[in-house]
């Protein structure tokens, strides 16, 4: 018998555990209402946004401890769920404070790493490292940026400044 302590080999946690049930329900309903998707798809979208934000929160905390900034990016199917969460500002603020110790700003930008998919390749391992379920349909094969070309371009700048 082989015993492994590899985190990936353990059952991944459900991302809905990252927010209170009433917040989860509000967020999923917002996605259903404003993006005209099924409940199942809205739950999957929000779940992946929460996994992304958990990974981002871990990066923010590590930055405060002196480690280098790591850039991760949402995909175009995940970004609207992040937007929906930001609009529920009290719940979003509470999530950020609990997981990152500060507000996680949404600063869309594009550069060659985003456009080529390199930024996404660096994102997936960070998502997996959270221990929460990563729904590969939302991450693998997705090469489009999270925002259109005319969005705010902050290439090369530090999103924490």
Image: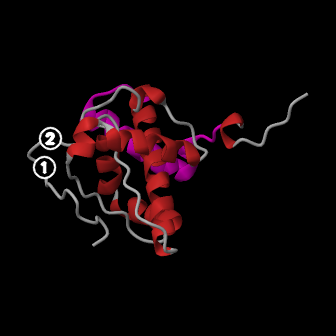
In which quadrant of the rendered image does the N terminus lie?
Answer: top right
Look at the image and tell me in which quarter the C terminus lies: bottom left
Q: Which residues are magenta?
A: 12-39
Report if residue 36 lies within the magenta region.
yes
Q: Residues within 10 Å of mark 1 (few under 14, many from 20)?
A: few
Q: Which residue is mark 1?
A: 151
Q: Is residue 120 above or below residue 61?
A: above
Q: Nearer the viewer, residue 62 or 49?
A: 62
Task: Using the image, determine if residue 114 lies above or below residue 140.
Answer: below
What residue is at 40 percent from the left and 65 percent from the top? 93
Q: Going 70% across and 35% down the picture, which residue do you hit?
A: 9
Q: Is residue 43 magenta?
A: no
- Measuring 61% from the left and 45% from the top, which residue is drawn there? 131
* Residue receiving disc 2: 148
- How far apart are the alpha carbons under marks 1 and 2? 6 Å
Q: Are marks 1 and 2 in contact (CB under 8 Å)?
A: yes
* Element assignment for label 1: loop
Percent x, y of residue 151? 13, 49
Residue 31: quadrant of the picture: top left
Where does the image place residue 149, in percent across and percent down from the top left?
11, 42
């Amino acid at each position: 018998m082989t015993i492994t302590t590899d985190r990936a080999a353990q059952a991944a946690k459900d991302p809905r555990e990252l927010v209170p049930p009433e917040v989860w329900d509000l967020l999923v309903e917002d996605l259903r209402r404003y993006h005209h998707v099924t409940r199942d798809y809205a739950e999957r979208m929000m779940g992946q946004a929460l996994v992304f934000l958990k990974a981002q929160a871990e990066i923010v905390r590590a930055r405060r401890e002196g480690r280098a900034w790591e850039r991760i990016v949402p995909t175009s199917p995940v970004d609207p769920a992040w937007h929906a969460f930001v609009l529920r500002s009290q719940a979003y603020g509470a999530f950020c404070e609990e997981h990152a110790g500060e507000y996680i700003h949404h600063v869309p930008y594009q550069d060659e790493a985003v456009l080529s998919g390199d930024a996404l390749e660096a994102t997936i391992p960070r998502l997996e490292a959270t221990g929460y379920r990563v729904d590969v349909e939302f991450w693998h094969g997705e090469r489009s940026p999270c925002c259109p070309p005319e969005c705010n371009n902050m290439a090369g700048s530090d999103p924490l400044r």
